[in-house]
Amino acid sequence: MYIPYGRQCLDEEDIEEVVKVLKSDYLTTGPKIREFEEKVEEYVGAKHAVAVCNGTAALHIAALAAGIREGDEVITTPITFAASANCVLYCGGTPVFADVDPETYNIDPAEIEKKITEHTKAIIPVHYTGQPCDMQKIHEIAKKHNLLVIEDAAHALGAAYHGEKIGGLSDMTCFSFHPVKPITTGEGGMVVTNDDELYKRLLLFRSHGITREEEFLTKNEGAWYYEQCLLGYNYRITDIGCALGCSQMKKLDGFIERRKEIAMRYNRAFEDVRGIKTPAQLEDVESGWHLYMIQVLGKDRKEVFDALRKEGIGVNVHYIPVYAHPYYREHGYAGEKCIHAEEFYARAISLPIFPAMTEEQQNYVIEKVKQYIN
Ligand SMILES: *Cc1c(COP(=O)(O)O)cnc(C)c1O
């Protein structure tokens, strides 16, 4: 038995929906793309959605649409997947790391303020583990300093902040549909926005910068005619993936319910275990529980980690602080040190959590964790 830290949850209906597309006229640029976008728009309460081939591409076109370029600084968290910061580098900008809150492990708004300079252009908060960041404070800071907010919500489709779903709150919000994420399209991602101008730019960046829309053309030579008006990419997603996405959207609330159940059960199981710190939640937020992180106190994290892996438990560590990677160290971040991020990284272990995880599997994980912590 091997229990992964996360995995997709597919059923026969999902498979049938994909097969239907395989038998249809369009494998890509067909009707399923828009159908999937509409489903997510409606669910998160955003005006526009642009589906792309993965979450990293979503972050990239969001940063491009935001106009990030050389000389611009963008503030993000070090406790995230590298893509949250890489998207700034892709545009020639400079990621700036603000330390995390030691309780929620999300970016600390007070640390964001400290990092603002005249070059700061945007903030990329990451709803780490699925728990929304303190968006009220982040929006106050953004407003005060005239910054764009691009949420990295790769963990947080279905999560809610002050009663509102993540996705409709900021200038742009990016999702990922990788198999371990809240829902999957195989590979896939999406940017949602309420802004018409950003939406138009996102569409262009998704597909080579090419448009056929009459209003964007400088002239029109005929029905065949199109123009490339900026340097975009081919970041399109397939109809095959979007068919899966549409089907998965129906199950999202159930997935999150099940994830929450698992998280609450871990919380109860570890309540009285002195060597474990369980994850704290902000008030009035609903986490998507993408990850369940424990901190190992008073014991060597690596020893506990290795022992759990030997027992067939696919524990993981999310994440190595981004600035600590050799690429970042070699590109100006060698002296970087976010104290809370480092402390968290040194103690963190992610335990398995995914909708299809059985009670029996969870009991086994709990038993082994307690055994090696004590
Ligand atoms: C998964 C993830 C991404 C990237 O998504 P992909 O679909 O794998 O490209 C970006 N940010 C965070 C926080 C993620 O977890």
Image (cartoon, helix red, strand yellow):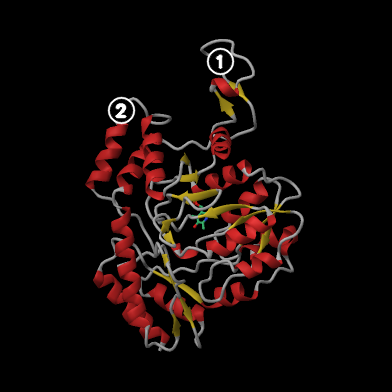
The disc label shown at residue 118, or none: none
Discs 1, 2 touching: Cβ within 8 Å = no
Count residues near mark 1 (Cα–Cα under 10 Å), then give few for <14, some for 14-19, many for 20+: few
> Hey, what amino acid is under mark 1?
Tyr
Front-most of residues 314 and 155 = 155
Quadrant where the image shows the C terminus: bottom left
The disc label shown at residue 225, or none: 1
Which residue was labeled with disc 2?
24
In the displayed image of the protein, which residue is found farthest to the left? 12
In the displayed image of the protein, which residue is found farthest to the top? 222
Q: Quadrant of residue 326?
A: bottom right
State the image coordinates of residue 240 (x, y, percent, origin top left).
36, 37
Label 1 vs 2, first from the N-terminus: 2
Q: Disc 1 on helix, strand or loop? A: loop
Mark 2 vs ligand 1: CB below 8 Å: no
Front-most of residues 19 and 256 = 256
Q: Is residue 211 above or below residue 97?
A: above
The residue sitting at 47% across, 40% down in the picture is: 48
> Hey, what amino acid is under mark 2?
Ser
Q: Is residue 367 above or below residue 26?
A: below
Q: Is residue 76 above or below residue 39?
A: below
Q: Is residue 330 left or right of residue 217?
A: right
State the image coordinates of residue 341 (x, y, percent, origin top left).
60, 72
Say whether residue 365 is visible: no
The residue sitting at 31% across, 75% down in the picture is: 265
Say whether residue 188 is visible: yes
Quadrant where the image shows the N terminus: bottom left
Q: Disc 2 on helix, strand or loop? A: loop
Of badges 1 and 2, the one in the foreground is 1
Distance between mark 1 and mark 2 Cα atoms: 27 Å
